[in-house]
Image (cartoon, helix red, strand yellow):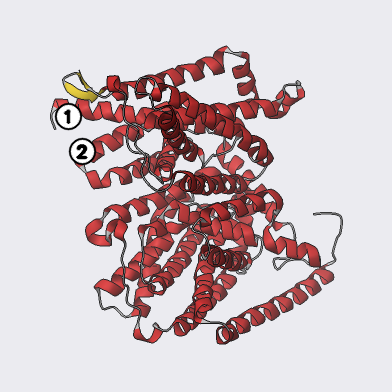
Amino acid sequence: MTGNQIIGQILSGVSRGMMLFLISSGLTLIFSVMNILNFAHASFWLLGAYFTWTFWKILYSPIFGLWASIPLAALTIGAIGWIIEVILIRRIYDRTLTEQLLLTYALVLIIGDLIKLTWGVADRIVPKPKMLSGLVNVFGSPFPVYYILVISLAGFVALGLWWLLYKTRFGRRVKASVFSREMVGALGIPIHRIYTGVFVLSLIIAGLAGGVQAPISSVTLGMDMSIIVECFCVMVIGGFGSLIGALVGSLIVSLVYAFAIMVVPKMALVLIFIVTAIVLIIRPWGIFGTAMRT
Amino acid sequence: MGDIWYSDEDLSNMMKTNSFRLYLWFALIFGGSIVLPLVVGVFWIHVLTEILILGLFAMSFNLLFGYMGQLSFGQAAYYGLGAYATAMMITKTSIPFPLCIIASILIAGICALIFGYFCVRLVGIYFAILTMAFGQLVYYIIFQWYEFTGGDNGIQGIPCPMLLRNAYSYYYFALIIVTIAIILMWRIINSSFGYTMRAIRDNCNRTRFIGINVEKHMLINFVIAGMFAGLAGSLWAPFNRSVSPDLANWTHSGIPVFMTIMGGPSNFFGPLIGSVVYTILFTSVIGFTEYWPLIMGTIIILMVLFFRGGIVEIFNKKTGQIDMNGSRKEGIFIQNGLRDSATNKGAE
């Protein structure tokens, strides 16, 4: 293993980790505010990738095709999320963990099949725009330019979430409703609107991530199934309900994966679960989580 | 519990009638399942066998969920292990079939012991996620280990023992095994161990205070559940003639959850009833559309939103009878128990 290889693995690990962060940040947000573990989050992410493909196909413009279709897809996912929140999620706030999990599990099945119905089983490929398709040298190892976009988007989302939660009135209300839902409601703040807002925001992030993912690899059915489990691992490692935990957890998971794939390629995925299990055993609430919330 | 108080005498009478009714039902179902194959065609024999196997799978899940109050989202791991162990022993060795089953149960049990040792230290959502993580561990090992398990190709053409090659004989074979398993489970649930499980479910800390080793009991229950799931998987492999890694995937773990919620977790036979409904639905839907997950997802959503407590609860409401465990509201206790023990553990 040379130095260049190590740097290369770190870079690709970080960019994959940022993709994981984009998904698990929304997952974390939904969990910490609404106390719902959304199995279907990665399904929305995949849906975002498919919508990006569709918009790209419709626009069919080499210059701004992708740039326009990613936000369009994200907004579409947000709109779908809004409808789903109002129709379904709103009814299960007070239900048991099992019922919530079962309902979002049902969403996984439904979205998976609707994707199959709409886009078929063929892989969908969105080419990278020309200006982002090359390689650059980072510390002497080649690095795809496109990954810089992924990393900067993740950084932007992380900063944006921080700003939203800590610097705005909406953020203060969100944090207050995490702390005491009844009290916030009693103060006359429409709690449902906050929940809807958080859900839609998380799905928009997922849609963005899906759109950015589309040019990285071909968009395939069932991609959501494997990545959602990795996102759970991220949440467990970082701590449920902690955004900084989601960031650190994503980096740990993806770096473990990146190095394992070089040393023991067959054990790479297995190793992620071993790391997760170890964290759960030592610190069930994760690195940044608190023991209070269950 | 409402404001109706029963005297001890009333209660014991009720229990008597209830247990009498239970045995009657049991005899009726068992008799029915013996006679039924003589009336229906081969196709439905396959469906019935599937109902039995998946029903056993769901009941093994309910040992954890209904009686221990913990949601496992990785029960498919033990099912898949059982299926793969049997499939590999039949195709690669010349071990007789009954021994294969026993060995598969043991393998699933040993894995449940190792994983369960860590899982039972957690509750609530952490328990669900850790069981899922271990389940995915098993899934990816099966998926990646091409030389040993055949990877994503699975194992095809598993030869069934000569005697059981006929659909009818396999059905009766499965019926006998599953009935024995159900009786065993019934004995376990109604033993002092079973009542300890319920106590842990209802209040983990109080159970600890009266001197019960909670983790040990939960671990034993976890292993038992894993072994029954392994048995179900072991019956599945020669029945289906092929196994694939998807048997151990987390999406497959959702099936017993669904069946149990559908049938009613508060009832001993709830998961089995869920299996009947699920399998018949599946068989009739798959005939005209490949979009079964879409339909199943819709049913789950409708069920979660509008039919809480499952089919058994609807039936109980109609007849107004106390269910077999002597309490109508057990389903609600489960939920409270889960929440309580979760917070208790977190606050420790």
- Residue at the spot 38% in from the left edge and 24% down from the top edge: A61
Residue A80 visible within the image: yes
Q: Nearer the viewer, residue A61 or B239?
A: A61
Placement of the N terminus of chain B among the 4 image quadrants: bottom right
The residue tagged 2 is A262
Placement of the C terminus of chain B among the 4 image quadrants: top right
How would you rate the neighbour count of disc 1 (Cα within 10 Å): few for under 14, some for 14-19, many for 20 or more? some
Q: Secondary structure at mark 1?
A: helix
How would you rate the neighbour count of disc 2 (Cα within 10 Å): few for under 14, some for 14-19, many for 20 or more? some
Q: Secondary structure at mark 2?
A: helix
Q: In this rendering, do the residues under marks 2 and 1 share a single chain?
A: yes
Residue B2: image location, x then y, percent: 83, 54
Residue found at the far top of this picture: A167
- Residue at the spot 30% in from the left edge and 36% down from the top edge: A256
Figure quadrant of residue A30: top right
Q: Nearer the viewer, residue B33 or B231?
A: B33
Callout 2 amino acid: Met
- Pointer 2 or 1: first along the chain: 1
Q: Nearer the viewer, residue A106 or B96?
A: A106
The vertical placement of A62 against A83, above or below, is above
Q: Is residue B281 left or right of residue A222?
A: right
Q: Are marks 2 and 1 in contact (CB under 8 Å)?
A: yes
Callout 1 amino acid: Gln
- Residue at the spot 59% in from the left edge and 53% down from the top edge: B69
Chain containing the residue with disc 1: A
Residue B347: image location, x then y, percent: 58, 36
Residue B318: image location, x then y, percent: 79, 65
Residue A153: image location, x then y, percent: 40, 21
Residue A25 visible within the image: no
Chain containing the residue with disc 2: A
Specify the label residue A5 is tagged with. 1
Between the C-alphas of marks 2 and 1, the distance is 9 Å
